[in-house]
């Protein structure tokens, strides 16, 4: 594995672990973080969250990761799975 | 219709499909829920009128059936893919307590299953059945005079599965076809539904991707109970204790990648393609691959599929791949006729490698 790829995977895993812990602790999911699959749907099936959870999730993402989604036209695209949240958080680091 | 026309029906209008690959049974009797709970991997914490997506696993922990469990008074309706009704009955006989009072009724051929999928599927259903269908929550069902309407779907768009009495299904099909045609759609094949499921990351038990894999590698842990015993539970615990080596990960490519292809990086093999198909929405190949756990993450451009002519680069991506139209459509505000007034960003927000 190249250094660049290794660095990318390390930073991605760190964000992924952070999102999993936030889901367990702040969203009060009764599930161990490592049992939350990265591509698990957040709403409806999967983690089974609802519209009330969505509001809390947006607040927590802002508070914990500085990810501001309130009012964004793309909020429904970014809050589909754990991985789409991780993508959005990692994009923050790419912003100038 | 061409595959592209069928795809457009599902992604932009409404599509009608026959669901001959899906079985449907009714398990009744005072112990129906307990018996069904004994064979399914998930916790059956679901109210009457709601639906639970779960699995039936083999002894090695591999999924053998993809199941909707639908509690209905003192019974459970099961819709399932991957096994026959006879195999499901044998599974109940093997794993449910023989003392339980249950009766299994195959709802075929008395009923047939058809589905309506698409961002305007609800509009076709509201005209054919009742406008009240708009208020039916995701993963719920209700009975009507000719059958039962289940709100589910595996395309990422609004989806309804209809179990219709066989003596009514001909007329129902004709009427629904007329409605979906007026919504820019038509009859759509299972091949197109499978492509849409692949793009949205839905598990398909009918694809080779399930062979030898457990819900751990398939990212289906949410369908597995941590609190009860079920067929395959021991194998999953053993796999969990040992640590999984691979995980299913989605990818896109420009062309020339197919199911079964090996995936490499500059140092050697890293995985294998488990499903791949050309996606009109992406303009390239959408696929799933089983990758070494250390690199099973989205956002990686370092991998390729070697071919005799050229290496085909792939890019790992997050699931679902598409920004489904149904996310932008509110049945209380929008209609197909006013679709031009709805925001219309691209289905695919990413780029190809």
Image: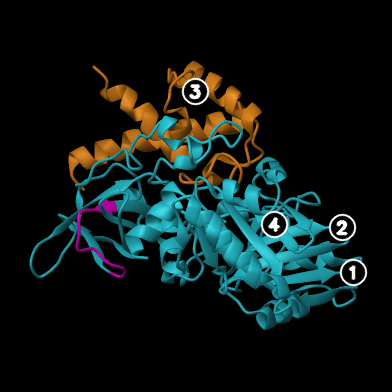
Chain colours: A orange, B cyan
Instruction: Report whether B166 appears left or right of B213.
Output: right
Which stretch did the figure color magenta? B252-260
CA distance for labels 1 and 2: 10 Å
Q: Are marks 4 and 3 on the same chain?
A: no
Query: Residue tagged by mark 3?
Result: A61
> Residue drawn at (60%, 76%), measured in percent from left and top?
B83
CA distance for labels 3 and 2: 40 Å
Tell me if residue B125 can be seen. yes
Q: Are marks 2 and 4 on the same chain?
A: yes
CB atoms at circles 3 and 1 under 8 Å apart? no
Task: Pick whichever, B187 or B20, lies toward us.
Answer: B187
**Mark 3 residue element:** helix
Query: Residue tagged by mark 1?
Result: B29
Percent position (x, y) of residue B327?
Answer: 49, 37
Task: Pick whichever, A92 or B5, lies toward us.
Answer: B5
| Tag in front: 3 or 2 | 2
| Tag in front: 1 or 4 | 4
| Tag in front: 4 or 3 | 4
Examine the image and state in which quarter residue B135 appears: top right
Residue neighbourhood size for the residue with mark 1, other residues' Cα within 10 Å, grouped as few (<14), some (14–19), many (≥20): some
CB atoms at circles 3 and 2 under 8 Å apart? no
Q: Are marks 1 and 2 on the same chain?
A: yes
Residue neighbourhood size for the residue with mark 4, other residues' Cα within 10 Å, grouped as few (<14), some (14–19), many (≥20): many
Query: Residue tagged by mark 4?
Result: B149
Return the mark for residue B73: 2
Percent position (x, y) of residue B19?
Answer: 57, 69
**Mark 1 residue element:** loop
**Mark 2 residue element:** loop
**Mark 4 residue element:** strand
């Amino acid at each position: 594995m190249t250094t660049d790829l290794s660095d990318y995977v390390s930073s991605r895993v760190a964000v992924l672990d952070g999102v999993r812990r936030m889901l367990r602790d702040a969203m009060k999911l009764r599930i161990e973080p490592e049992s939350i699959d990265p591509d698990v749907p957040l709403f409806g099936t999967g983690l089974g969250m609802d519209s009330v959870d969505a509001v809390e999730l947006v607040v927590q993402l802002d508070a914990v990761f500085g990810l501001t989604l309130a009012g964004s036209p793309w909020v429904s695209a970014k809050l589909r799975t754990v991985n789409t949240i991780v993508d959005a958080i990692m994009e923050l680091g790419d912003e100038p | 219709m061409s595959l592209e026309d069928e795809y457009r029906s599902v992604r932009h209008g409404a599509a009608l499909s026959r669901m001959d690959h899906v079985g449907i049974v009714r398990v009744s009797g005072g112990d129906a829920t307990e018996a069904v709970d004994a064979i399914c991997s998930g916790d059956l914490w679901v109210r009457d009128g709601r639906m639970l997506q779960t699995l039936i696993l083999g002894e090695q922990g591999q999924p053998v059936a993809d199941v909707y469990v639908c509690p209905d008074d003192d019974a459970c309706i099961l819709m399932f893919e991957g096994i026959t009704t006879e195999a499901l009955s044998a599974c109940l006989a093997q794993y449910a307590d023989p003392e339980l009072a249950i009766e299994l009724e195959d709802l075929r051929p008395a009923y047939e299953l058809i589905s309506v999928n698409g961002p305007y599927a609800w509009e076709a259903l509201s005209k054919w059945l009742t406008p009240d269908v708009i208020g039916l929550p995701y993963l719920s069902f209700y009975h009507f005079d000719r059958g039962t309407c289940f709100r589910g779907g595996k395309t990422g768009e609004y989806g309804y599965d209809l179990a219709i009495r066989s003596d009514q299904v001909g007329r129902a099909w004709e009427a629904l076809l007329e409605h979906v045609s007026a919504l820019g759609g038509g009859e759509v094949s299972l091949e197109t539904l499978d492509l849409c499921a692949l793009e949205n990351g839905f598990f398909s038990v009918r694809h080779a991707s399930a062979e030898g894999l457990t819900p751990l590698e398939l990212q289906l842990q949410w369908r597995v109970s941590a609190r009860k015993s079920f067929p395959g539970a021991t194998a999953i615990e053993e796999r969990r204790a040992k640590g999984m080596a691979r995980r299913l990960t989605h990818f896109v490519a420009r062309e020339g990648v197919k199911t079964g292809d090996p995936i490499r990086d500059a140092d050697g093999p890293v995985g294998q393609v488990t499903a791949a198909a050309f996606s009109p929405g992406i303009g390239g190949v959408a696929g799933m691959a089983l990758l070494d756990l250390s690199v099973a993450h989205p956002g990686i451009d370092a991998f390729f599929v070697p071919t005799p002519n050229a290496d085909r680069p792939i890019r790992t991506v997050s699931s679902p791949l598409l920004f489904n139209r149904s996310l932008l459509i509110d049945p209380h505000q929008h209609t197909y006729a006013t679709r031009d007034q709805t925001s219309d960003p691209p289905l695919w927000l990413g780029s190809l490698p």
